[in-house]
Amino acid sequence: MVRRVLLACVWLLPAAASAQSTGTPSRLLQGIVTDAQTRDVLPGVSVFVPALDRGAATDLGGHFHISGLPADTLTVRITSVGFEPLVRRVDLREGNVSIDVRLRGATLGLTSVDVTADASRQRLTEDVRAVSTLDGDELEALRGSSLGETLAEINGVSTLSSGPTVAKPVVRGLHSERVLILDNGVQQEGQQWGGEHAPEIDPFAPGEIEVVKGAAGVEYGAGAIGGVIRLQDRPLPDAPGVGGRLSTQAFTNSGQGAASLFLEGADSGGLAWRVRGSVRRAGDARTPDFVVRNSAFAEASGEAVLGVQLGGIDWEARARRFATELGIYKGSHFGNQRNLEEIIARGGPDPDWNYEFSYEIEAPKQVVTHDVGSLRAGWRTGLGEWTAQAGVQRNHRQEFDAHRPYSDSLAALGERPSFDLTLYTGTFDTRLRHRQSDRLFGTVGVSWLNQVNSNGASGYLIPNFSAVTGGLFAHQTWLATDRLSLEAGTRLDARWQRARPYNPALREIEVEARTYGSLSGTLGALYTLGSAWSVSGNLGTAWRPPGINELYAFGVHHGTARFERGSTDLVPERSLDASATLRHESALASAEVNAYANRIADYIYFLETEGPTITIRGTFPTFDAVQDDALLRGLDATAEVRPLSWLTLGGSASLLRADNLDRDGPLYGVPSDRFGARLRLHRERLGPLAAPFAEVEVRHTTRQDRIQPEAYLPAPPPDAYTLTGLRFGTEVTVNGTPLRLALGIDNLFDVRYRDILSRFRYFIDEPGRNVTFRVTVPFGSVGT
Amino acid sequence: MYRIPTLLALAFALTLAACDSDPVDPNPEELITEVTVTLTPSGGGSSLTIVASDPDGDGAGLTFAPASITLTPGVTYNGTIELRDTINGEDITEEVEEEAEEHLFRYTVSPSSAGTASVTDSESDYTSEDDNGGDFGVGLTFDVAVDGSASGTGTLNATLFHFDEGPKTSSTATSDEIDVDIDFPVQFGTVVTAK
């Protein structure tokens, strides 16, 4: 997905803005740029107006001025090496404007940064790897959806779903433990091994979502061999005042209502704060033919952030809680393989149910809470900019089975989870961004993770364990010429873990300790061709130790009628990922084409083994954790053309070919090819409407015909499908307050479809038509 | 910058707060671990018993004791079935009796030429009629009629359908939730039993 800076932050219009007609170019924008932390003036900072393709750089005193601007509201992008980019909306309708800009030190990541005053160049040189960003309007247009559904908007990202209530992101065919989620710098740790365990993130919270596709082991350590999803809150305000925003959504398909409210403020002494609360409540989803029984959910989240500058240190403290209770489609709960075959043959829900829409959540269901507290500090020394961040997390997951205990004594205890896991995680990271010169800079860092898992209920699917992971890394960027930048990085990680798995042969709990350690590395180059094109290449290697479930799982996995057995013989998997990216950025068009090949040695997956597991409950296909060499090759391409000031055309394609090199054939469990096209009509203004737009989008997903020969498939892969969506939006000023309104229709033609990545594809169709309505109301001094 | 070591120490202490001693190991979940079928010739004679057991619950391997039972051709047997959770020491048969309207056993002889099996009890044998006023088979008792020409080996399958959505609606109803599904090994022939 192309970063749409032009449209970003339209809703940041100051509440006091009054409508006036635009005049002839005559206005002057000037100001001063300082470091938010040290208050030093910053020379050489790029101040750019993308809509006009004009900009300036600050002088030695940090001042800039751009004259001859139209009397209109304009978006200005302020960027500098080592600082978070800042987008400001300025209102030049009533006269010249002077702004005071404070840039905050960049704290995240190692994105290669440009040194020229050119926003399009910044996009061209964003990263040597494929990176996609959702922010501003794009993100606002998806508010109310879960994180997994939101991420599916990004080309190359698909969704692994377990009914309408559970969606988790799949990046280039990899998911779960292979995709790391970083929430404001803290590595999100839940029971992410489970395909039906969605990320425990308030989808309203991130102000920006960035997906790094491909191995990112150097920055983020062992595990991140598929990609990294970085979620970043909008920056805390730096101008004194108090403001906030209320955003509400209504979805017709599931009767969903959602709302999120945040308030934020700052004083002149460097103190800033934000509090946020969000709720989402939905009833049962509907396919074109029936109501999906027990697919209601209720979710609530809260967050508090405090930033303060004390004695040259920039502190940021955060606390957040995410809580959800979500129903799992009733029909996914059944007995043994024989039941599964009968359900597939029937093709739909139990005809005896006569089920009607409701908001009730019954078993089977998941009840999850996730708490995170973190403290970050940033400061400068002669060596460079330091950041240190400590985080503690508690993830509590309870899963309730539809099966009631036979025993009266157990039944009398009432509803008890069949699965009750608590995971405590402590993380600590510190890194130093240093500069040898304007052309040579880099980062070194240390990270530490400490984890304890407690299985509070019954069953042996996941044992108790404790683990410690430590890592050490260095990354360097060299701007060899004005056009060529080179980067390299390496990292050493070690993991110690002690688990208490059940040994089925000895019929007892054992204690098993394991140690892993290995290196990750990356090499990249980026070359800009003229002012509108860039090419980059990256070669990375990363590794992942086998997950706890892959080592020790032992039992029937509900909803899939499969008996899963881990293997203690597993060794870490290692990926070697090569990618090449071509980017184009001009007034007329934006495009990114990325080709990649990811070879994973000893790729771990569950494969059906000959001979089913026979139990008193009947027969279940047996799935053993096995390792094969895999090769995933693909192409992700997006393009956007802006032939007229009111017309934008976009297209995307995501292709993936995954092979199992040891078994000569395709690799099982990867998404099918996806194609998309969209047409968007937009105006700066239409009568009383600001920035109105209408968009139609068509997406096609092919049938996955590449199936691993030995793979167990209870039913053939689902057919190809095409979905159409419509979106309309605008901004209306009512009593001086700019209301943002959006109307959307997903699955316009109520198409009946199933997807290869839906774990419930054997039981139910995906949801049908959904009409969405969104209203966003800013108040106070937000964004000014 | 004396604050920095303080900061590091504080942050590190925070991460160690996640440290914990070894947690308590989980208990096994409630499962039917032992199923006993007893067959008594209707014309009199000593009864046959076969026990299917999976003492750890799922997965450690289902075993039969004895390895099989021998049914005499031409004889009709009166059967009973008992379910136990040996891990938690629960008699599940009693629970099935109490919730007779939510359970239905079905028995099948294989090959089908070797005989037929039929359920001989109904809900009102254990409880009064169910909430819907129905009175259907349960299958805690049953008959197995062995064909006079039966020979060789076969199986007697016992399947328990669980109707957690409420009372079953007929004596041939099925549900998506099977709680027991066992093929008991059977031989057909005349055995000389020591009295």
Image (spheres, helix red, strand yellow):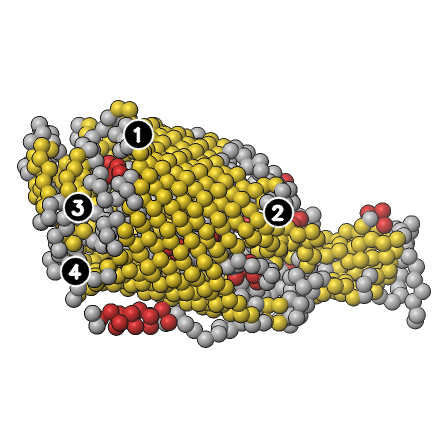
Instruction: Say which mark, if any, is on residue A391.
Output: none
Q: Is residue A64 left or right of residue A426?
A: left
Labels 3 and 1 positioned on one and the same chain:
yes
Q: Amino acid at mark 4?
A: Leu
Residue A192 in view, yes or no: no
Q: Position of residue A634 (x, y in %)?
A: 48, 38
Which residue extends farthest front? A480
Q: What distance separates the C-alpha of mark 3 from that of mark 1?
A: 26 Å
SS of the residue under disc 4: loop
Nearest-to-viewer mark from 2 and 1? 2
Q: Position of residue B137 (x, y in %)?
A: 70, 54
Q: Is residue A290 left or right of residue A70?
A: right
Q: Residue at x 42, y 61 (%)?
A: A492
Which badge, 2 or 1, comes first in the chain's sequence? 1
Q: Amino acid at mark 3?
A: Val
Disc 3: host chain: A
Nearest-to-viewer mark from 1 and 4? 1
Q: Residue at x 22, y 38 (%)?
A: A118
Labels 1 and 4 positioned on one and the same chain:
yes
Q: Is residue A180 left or right of residue A116?
A: right
* Residue count near mark 2 (Cα–Cα under 10 Å), binned few <14, some 14–19, many ≥20: few
According to the picture, the residue beneath numbered tag 3 turns out to be A45
According to the picture, the residue beneath numbered tag 1 turns out to be A589
Q: What distance separates the C-alpha of mark 4 from that of mark 2?
A: 58 Å
Which residue extends farthest bottom? B21
Which badge, 4 or 2, comes first in the chain's sequence? 4
